[in-house]
Image (spheres, coloured by chain):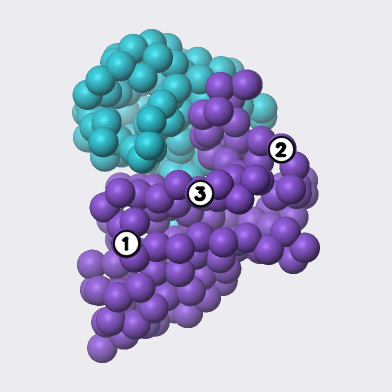
């Protein structure tokens, strides 16, 4: 049974750095083909993909946010950490981590399992 | 980035109705398309991947079709628990992108 759960601050001030942790169970991020991604959703708006880390430590970032994002993993702790620098009120959103599932041998990933999400508000 | 456009943005339907949602990609994505269902205050739930493959545990009243740029999600007989917002997502190229969502409301 695969589960994921996000944790981190609920309120950050503008210009601060946000650090979110995804703690998961039911799979290992050292297993070939596995990935963990981050997706966010501003209140009342659509989903926006942020980043993905692969089992081999390869990483992908949203081009529009790449300069502000860092994704890392701690395989021994079953955790993935996302940091986002220079937070702004427009970054207020629910942040989700999700299990990236590869479609066959294609190398293309969709998201089969999602955490419950954590709402982060950016305000002074 | 590939733009995903869903239509309609919202629809009203009754229990038992057949509902179809359309998703169009700004360029070809083969069959690398997923559909998600999201209820208020909850995380998205994967319904379909590879454009037409039903995720394990998802009721068979849900189906997906299409390839290239045009895709559809069909709910054959709408149930009360199906009232939600639906998103398509392409995963053919980075960054993965989502449609703006289609809200299915009770008529």
Where residue A113 sits, quadrant-wise, is: top right
Q: Is residue A71 above or below residue A33?
A: below
Residue occupied by mark 3: A59
Q: Please give the name of the residue rendered at 59% of the width and 45% of the height, measured from the top-left corner.
A: A54
Label 3 CA crowd tier, 10 Å (few <14, some 14–19, many 20+) = some
Q: Which quadrant of the figure contains the N terminus of chain B?
A: top left
Pointer 2 chain: A
- Work out how far the residue at label 1 is from the one at label 3, CA to CA, in angstroms: 13 Å
Q: Please check whether the numbered discs 2 and 1 fall on a single chain.
A: yes
**Relative to residue A106, is residue A34 drawn left or right?**
right
Pointer 1 chain: A
- Work out how far the residue at label 2 is from the one at label 1, CA to CA, in angstroms: 28 Å
Residue occupied by mark 2: A32
- SS label for mark 1: helix
Residue B11 seen in render: no
Query: Relative to the observer, which residue lies in front, B88 or B75?
Result: B88
Residue B51 at x, y percent in the picture: 46, 18
Chain B tint as drawn: cyan
Label 2 CA crowd tier, 10 Å (few <14, some 14–19, many 20+) = few
Say if mark 1 contacts mark 3, CB within 8 Å: no
């Amino acid at each position: 049974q695969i589960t994921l759960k996000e944790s981190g601050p609920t309120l950050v001030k503008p210009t601060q750095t946000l650090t979110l942790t995804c703690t998961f169970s039911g799979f290992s991020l050292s297993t070939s083909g596995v990935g963990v991604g981050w997706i966010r959703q501003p209140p009342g708006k659509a989903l926006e993909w942020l980043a993905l880390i692969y089992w081999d430590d390869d990483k992908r970032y949203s081009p529009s946010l790449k300069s502000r994002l860092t994704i890392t993993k701690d395989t021994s702790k079953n955790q993935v950490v996302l940091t986002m620098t220079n937070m702004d009120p427009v970054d207020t959103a629910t942040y989700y981590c999700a299990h990236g599932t590869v479609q066959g041998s294609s190398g293309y990933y969709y998201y089969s399992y999602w955490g419950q999400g954590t709402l982060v508000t950016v305000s002074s | 980035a590939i733009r995903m456009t869903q239509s309609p943005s919202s629809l009203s339907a009754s229990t038992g109705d057949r509902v179809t949602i359309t998703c169009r990609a700004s360029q070809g994505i083969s069959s690398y398309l997923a559909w998600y269902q999201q209820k208020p205050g909850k995380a998205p739930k994967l319904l379909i991947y590879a454009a037409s493959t039903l995720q394990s545990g998802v009721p068979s009243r849900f189906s997906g079709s299409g390839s290239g740029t045009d895709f559809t999600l069909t709910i054959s007989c709408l149930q009360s628990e199906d009232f939600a917002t639906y998103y398509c997502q392409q995963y053919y190229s980075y960054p993965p992108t989502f449609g703006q969502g289609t809200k299915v409301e009770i008529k």
